[in-house]
Image (cartoon, grey):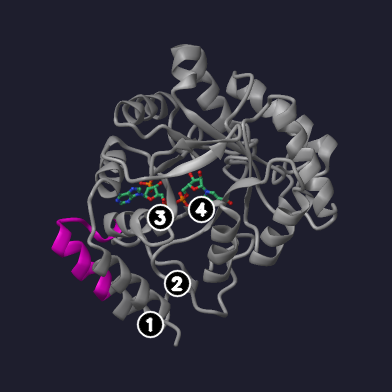
Amino acid sequence: MTTFENTMRLSGVDVAIPPLALGTMYWGTDVAVPVAHDLLDMALERGATFVDTANNYAFWREGATGDESEQCLGAWVAARGSAARERVTLATKVGARPARPGGDLSDAMGLRPASVAEQVRASLARLRTDHVDLVYAHIDDDTVPMPEILGGLQQLVTDGLTRAIAASNLTAPRLAEATGAAGDGPRYAALQNRFTYLTPAPTADLSPHVLLDEETVVVARDAGVSLLGYSPLLSGAYTRTDRELPEGFRHSGTQSALSALHDAADAHGLDAGQMVLAWMTQRTDPVIPVVGVSSREQLISAAQAVSTHIEPRVLDALDHTRNGTHR
Ligand SMILES: NC(=O)c1ccc[n+]([C@@H]2O[C@H](COP(=O)([O-])OP(=O)(O)OC[C@H]3O[C@@H](n4cnc5c(N)ncnc54)[C@H](OP(=O)(O)O)[C@@H]3O)[C@@H](O)[C@H]2O)c1
């Protein structure tokens, strides 16, 4: 994979990061473990070494507990060995695991420091490693003061359980608050919110997902926080007739935005989903796509997309079109 410039601050140093994160939300549930392991082997061969999981994937699937994705990755680590583990930049998330089996996000384990430490140790056991590279606070927790949340996460770095900390599903004001609360300790190295080319209607309810909006991009840029965007392909709806655009993304501006996207994609020999990934990684404020893959073809497609050079005027035109959608 030809990579564009991306760095993230891990263990206090700027480390090169590939412009694609492998989403493993359904590995070990919808995606069988041997298939997932084959995908991870192939991803590493192609330089897609940034792997994204969480301590609750995918608890909402029939018969699942939320252990499955991490256990699937842990089985890969056990089979391939510690040298293979070190080739992966491994990120997990805590805080959004139901406290009781059969529960949901309304009783999530949350971000109290003692719980966070316990959750991370459980993740490490499932992942069969003694540290991860990034721990995200998966969803915000307004029952815990922000300095306490940061203190708990920073302690993980001090204890060597993770190289860096990050946030997911955080709004711009809360990201600013978190940056202030970090003091002299490690700040959030990255923010992972929902992001794709199409913008939802302003009235759309995406909860519990938090959108990466322009206000958040600015706060992140000023604080040196790397950006990641999840669900970039809208589950394949840009290209597949068996996938509908989610309701909030179907509005009066959708067709013209899609038309501009298809024109740009055609001009670069990409499909519309690939164009979204290429645009994300190379725009003025790059956003690393966290892409769910369940087959070799999907992995190859994503890797090809983020390796395709797009001229700045095309990138800017796409930004302009999507931003004008609701004006
Ligand atoms: N931080 C958070 O709160 C949060 C929330 C959601 C997700 N995530 C992360 O983001 C990752 C991706 O999320 P997502 O699954 O919602 O995102 P997505 O990337 O929008 O959708 C992935 C799905 O799109 C389909 N697909 C992939 N490549 C394709 C291609 N080339 N052509 C057509 N269809 C294709 C596949 O569906 P099939 O497998 O059905 O073929 C795949 O599972 C997750 O795995 C997880 O790591 C994070």
Residue 212 in view here: no
Which residue position is annotated with label 3? 235
Amino acid type for the residue under numbered disc 1 = Gly
Q: Which residue is mark 1?
A: 253
* Residue at 68% across, 52% down: 139
Q: Amino acid at mark 2?
A: Thr
User: Upstream in the sequence, badge 1 or badge 4?
Assistant: 4
The reply to whether callout 1 and callout 2 are in contact (CB within 8 Å) is: yes
Q: Identify the mark nearer the N-term, 2 or 3.
A: 2
Determine crowd level at label 4: few under 14, some 14-19, many 20+ residues with C-alpha closer than 10 A: many
For the residues marked 1 and 2, what is the alpha-carbon distance in whole angstroms? 9 Å
* Mark 3 CB within 8 Å of ligand 1: yes
Disc 1 and disc 3 in contact, CB within 8 angstroms: no
Q: Main secondary structure of the magenta part?
A: helix
Q: Nearer the viewer, mark 4 or mark 2?
A: 4
Q: Where does the N terminus fall, quadrant-wise?
A: top left
Q: Earlier in the sequence, mark 3 or mark 4?
A: 4
The answer to which of marks 1 and 2 sits earlier in the sequence is 2
Residue, disc 2:
199
**Which class describes the residues within 10 Å of circle 1: few (<14), some (14-19), or many (20+)?**
some
What are the residue bounds of the magenta stretch? 259-273
Question: Camera-side residue: 243 or 307?
Answer: 307
Give residue 100's position: percent from left, percent from top: 78, 40
Q: Earlier in the sequence, mark 1 or mark 3?
A: 3
Task: Write the residue at 60% across / 39% down.
Answer: 54
- Residue 246: give x, y in percent of width and height: 45, 67
Q: Amino acid at mark 3?
A: Ser
Q: Nearer the viewer, mark 1 or mark 4?
A: 4
Percent x, y of residue 315: 30, 66
Image marks 3 and 4: residues in contact by CB distance under 8 Å: no
